[in-house]
Image (cartoon, grey):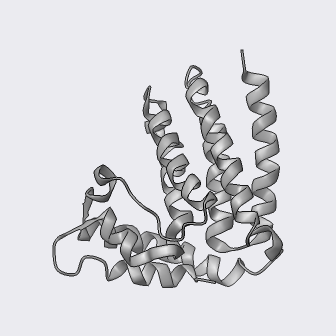
Amino acid sequence: MARLMDIVSTLEGAGNDSDDVTLGEINDQVGHRGTAALLGIPAALELTPIGGIPGVPTIIALIIALFAVQILFGREDMWLPGFLENRSVSKQKLHTSLDKLRPAAKWSDRHLGDHLSILVHAPATRIVALAIILLCCTIPPLELLPFASSIPSGTILLFSLGLLTRDGRVMALAWLAFIAALWGIWALWP
């Protein structure tokens, strides 16, 4: 199991040759250890006020679905489309973000992981990928109601945290959220 602090340390070394770091370089550095983060980062972004901008939740859902389909087919290293792979962030912003993530990663490494492992190892990861794809399919119609797409996005974020920490307790919570999200979506559906 990859510890989150190992991922943070790996990211600190990304893009040592330039002032900017591309998402492609970050993806190459982290490799298969960061696939869950590629699901969680866009889902977390959708939960911010950006998720209220018309069209943005659908674009984010397409990006998440792209990664979930790759997980479903057993791909360990994620393929990024060129428009994402070439996006860059300054090394300074990356290091500032990593400094903010470090305490959470240390806490996670101490308290999460290696519980109910049946919920976080194959074939469970592929079942999770299917659930995430289903949630992504609900996001475009939910855009008609302001911030309603946060229901499936929050559940996707929980699934990604369960996969990232490899903690079955978090994954069990994500499955409960999945059931609640489906019920909530059904209740909101016109």
Q: Which residue is painted at 55% across and 25% down in the image?
A: 143
Vertical placement of 84 versus 102: above or below?
A: above
- Which of the 4 image quadrants contains residue 36? bottom right
Q: Which residue lies at the image location 40% right of the left edge and 82% below the top edge?
A: 10
Left or right, residue 97 beside residue 66: left
Q: Nearer the viewer, residue 82 or 178?
A: 82
* Residue projecting furthest to the front: 73
**Within the image, what quadrant is residue 183 found in?**
top right
State the residue in front, 50 or 35: 35
Residue 178 placement (x, y as % from top left): 76, 46
Location of the N terminus by quadrant is bottom right
Instruction: State the quadrant of the C terminus.
Output: top right
Residue positioned most to the left:
18
Extreme residue in the top direction:
190
The residue positioned 62% from the left and 35% from the top of the image is 137
Q: Position of residue 114 (x, y in %)?
A: 76, 81
x and y percentages locating residue 107 in the rendered image: 62, 78
Query: Which one is nearer the viewer's eye here, 63 or 92?
Result: 63
Q: How many marks?
A: 0
Tell me which residue sits at (29%, 53%) in the image: 82
Q: Taking 183 as reference, is 8 left or right? A: left
Report the side of 56 relative to 135 (left or right).
Answer: left
Whether residue 147 is situated above or below residue 76 in the rendered picture: above
Note whether 170 is above or below 158 in the view shown: below
Relative to 160, 187 lies left or right: right
